[in-house]
Image (cartoon, rainbow, N blue to C red):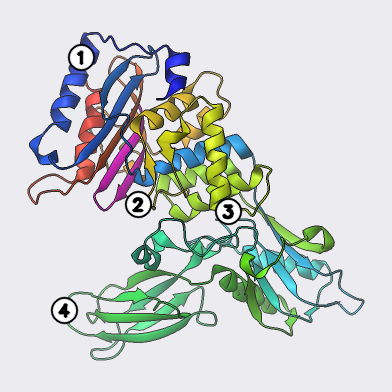
């Protein structure tokens, strides 16, 4: 049960004519024969009156997909606040000597900033760090350049993520030292007929090893980029037609901390700082105890955008890597023993839900993105969370709502519900996995009533002639806004 709604909103099950109308339409839709064999968890509540307008399987545990990001966002705001920033530090054993030589290794220590060297390659944060080091008087690094992601204790993937996810950009490895979305972009251009295509890697051929197995040949474009498991090489196969458009393949790296170290070393050399050693990485499992940063000299640092801005980017575009890192960040902020891990963050989420009057047994999340097929929530719990964040006086409620995609306007809802009564009047988080489709958020009815809703559809296999599952969910949302 979601106790908070009943206590604070005073929920009653009696409904007026309008509620009965929308309830009847919703019931007819979810009861259509095409959904036989699938499961629904649907809940709609008025935030103004507290009435439950519709409930179909609201207490049933369902796989939420990216609707799990709603819980991550609320937890992060609760634990960190909207103005929190994530610091990335450059450490040495001490200051440089009189000749500008930094003894020992140079350590790039990440704390989970998902924006460090962004996906689009814009900006030069590592170059900024190199300039800070130069201004500190460093002209030579006597040791290695070390990428240290030990702030989080992670195996290189989120709990419950499937092996096939790890080969795609949406399954990029989470790491406390994150750069370029923890992947590389392979830009592929057709060559002369019969010749290999040209492959240009970003962030550059000096740090990316590419095995080019492509050809330029007539026919449809069929190029594919991937990283063979257990290797640090990137393979590109397939073909592009002569004179055809270039293609882009984004492929996750196996060790993001090593990539960061390689890129920092390149930035140092570009700045004119000599580096004697090589780039390498250090992970949590290689440290018997957490790094004692207080014993080191911070020689430079970067700070992320505000958490509110990070959440907005994460929810609007449904970024799995960013969501997982912010989930871990929220857990790390709560005092307690043990490493900064998903388990710690899951415990923090349960404590947060319990303190808010929500039933933690209805929210079984083991990671922050919703990519896990083992995550479970109820529609009751989702609506309870939405009501909590919309409560008058809720300090972070406006930040939370502003981060949600708007129907027909932006984010993952930019092209959905456009031209309908829901455009601009539905703010909601999408969610899609194989056989799982979800949509949860806020709607404003034709009469101006504020609604919180959760539509969770599991085990649904669309028939060839049926609309996409997203259209089925959108139809439900539009019903909430129609006269």
N-terminal of the two: label 1 or label 3?
Answer: 1
Q: Quadrant of the N terminus?
A: top left
Say few, some or many: other residues with alpha carbon within 10 Å of mark 1 (under 14 / 14 to 19 / 20 or more). Answer: some
Residue 434 inside the magenta-drawn segment: yes
Q: Position of residue 2 (x, y in %)?
A: 42, 24
Q: Which residue is located at x 19 percent, y 46 percent?
A: 460
Q: Nearer the viewer, mark 1 or mark 4?
A: 1
Identify the residue under disc 3.
341
Q: Is residue 424 visible in the rendered structure shown here? A: no
- Check disc 2 and report its element: helix, strand or loop: loop
Say few, some or many: other residues with alpha carbon within 10 Å of mark 2 (under 14 / 14 to 19 / 20 or more). Answer: some
- Check disc 4 and report its element: helix, strand or loop: loop
N-terminal of the two: label 3 or label 2?
Answer: 3
N-terminal of the two: label 1 or label 4?
Answer: 1
Marking on residue 373: 2
Q: Which residue is located at x 20 percent, y 44 percent?
A: 469
> Pointer 1 and pointer 3: residues touching (CB < 8 Å)?
no
Q: Quadrant of the C terminus?
A: top left
Between 370 and 246, the one lying in front of the other is 370
Q: Compared with residue 274, is residue 182 higher up or lower down, i.e. above or below?
A: above
Could you tell me how far apart the alpha carbons at marks 2 and 4 are, in whole angstroms? 37 Å
Q: Nearer the viewer, mark 1 or mark 2?
A: 2
Which contiguous range is marked in magenta?
429-442
Could you tell me how far apart the alpha carbons at marks 1 and 2 are, in whole angstroms? 35 Å
Q: Which residue is located at x 83 percent, y 70 percent?
A: 93
> Pointer 1 and pointer 2: residues touching (CB < 8 Å)?
no
Identify the residue under disc 1.
20
Q: Nearer the viewer, mark 2 or mark 4?
A: 2
């Amino acid at each position: 049960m979601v106790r908070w709604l009943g206590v604070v909103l005073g929920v009653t099950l009696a409904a007026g004519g309008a509620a009965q109308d929308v309830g009847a339409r919703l019931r007819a839709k979810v009861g259509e024969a095409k959904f036989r064999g699938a499961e629904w968890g649907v809940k709609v509540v008025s935030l103004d009156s507290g009435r439950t307008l519709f409930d179909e399987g609201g207490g049933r545990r369902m796989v939420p997909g990216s609707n799990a990001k709603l819980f991550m966002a609320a937890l992060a705001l609760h634990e960190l606040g909207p103005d929190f920033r994530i610091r990335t530090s450059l450490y040495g054993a001490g200051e440089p000597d009189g000749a500008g030589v930094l003894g020992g290794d140079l350590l790039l220590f990440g704390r989970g900033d998902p924006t460090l060297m962004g996906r689009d390659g814009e900006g030069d944060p590592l170059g900024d760090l190199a300039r800070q080091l130069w201004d500190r008087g460093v002209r030579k690094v006597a040791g290695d350049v070390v990428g240290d992601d030990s702030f989080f204790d992670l195996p290189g993937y989120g709990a419950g993520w499937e092996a096939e996810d790890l080969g795609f950009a949406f399954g990029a490895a989470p790491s406390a030292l994150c750069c370029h979305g923890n992947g590389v972009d392979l830009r592929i251009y057709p060559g002369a007929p019969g010749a290999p295509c040209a492959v240009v890697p970003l962030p550059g051929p000096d740090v990316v090893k590419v095995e080019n197995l492509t050809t330029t040949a007539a026919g449809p474009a069929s190029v594919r980029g991937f990283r063979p498991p257990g290797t640090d090489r990137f393979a590109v196969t397939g073909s592009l037609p002569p004179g055809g458009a270039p293609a882009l393949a984004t492929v996750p790296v196996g060790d993001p901390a090593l990539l960061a170290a390689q890129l920092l070393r390149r930035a140092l050399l570009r700045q004119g700082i000599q580096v004697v050693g090589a780039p390498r990485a250090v992970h949590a499992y290689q440290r018997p105890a957490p790094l004692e940063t207080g014993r080191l000299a911070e020689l430079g640092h970067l700070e992320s955008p505000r958490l509110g801005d990070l959440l907005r980017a994460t929810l609007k575009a449904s970024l799995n890597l960013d969501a997982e890192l912010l989930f871990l960040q929220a857990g790390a902020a709560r005092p307690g023993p043990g490493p900064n891990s998903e388990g710690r963050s899951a415990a923090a989420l349960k404590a947060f839900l319990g303190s808010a009057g929500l039933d933690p047994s209805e929210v079984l999340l083991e990671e922050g993105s919703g990519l896990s097929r083992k995550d479970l929530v109820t529609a009751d719990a989702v609506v309870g969370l939405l009501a909590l964040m919309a409560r008058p006086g809720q300090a972070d409620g406006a930040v939370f709502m502003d981060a949600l995609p708007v129907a027909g306007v932006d984010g993952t809802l930019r092209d959905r519900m456009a031209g309908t009564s829901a455009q601009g009047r539905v703010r909601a988080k999408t969610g899609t996995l194989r056989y799982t489709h979800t949509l949860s958020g806020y709607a404003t009815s034709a009469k101006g009533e504020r609604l919180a809703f959760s539509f969770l559809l599991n085990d649904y296999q669309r028939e060839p002639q049926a609309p996409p599952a997203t259209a089925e969910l959108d139809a439900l949302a539009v019903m909430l806004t129609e006269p």
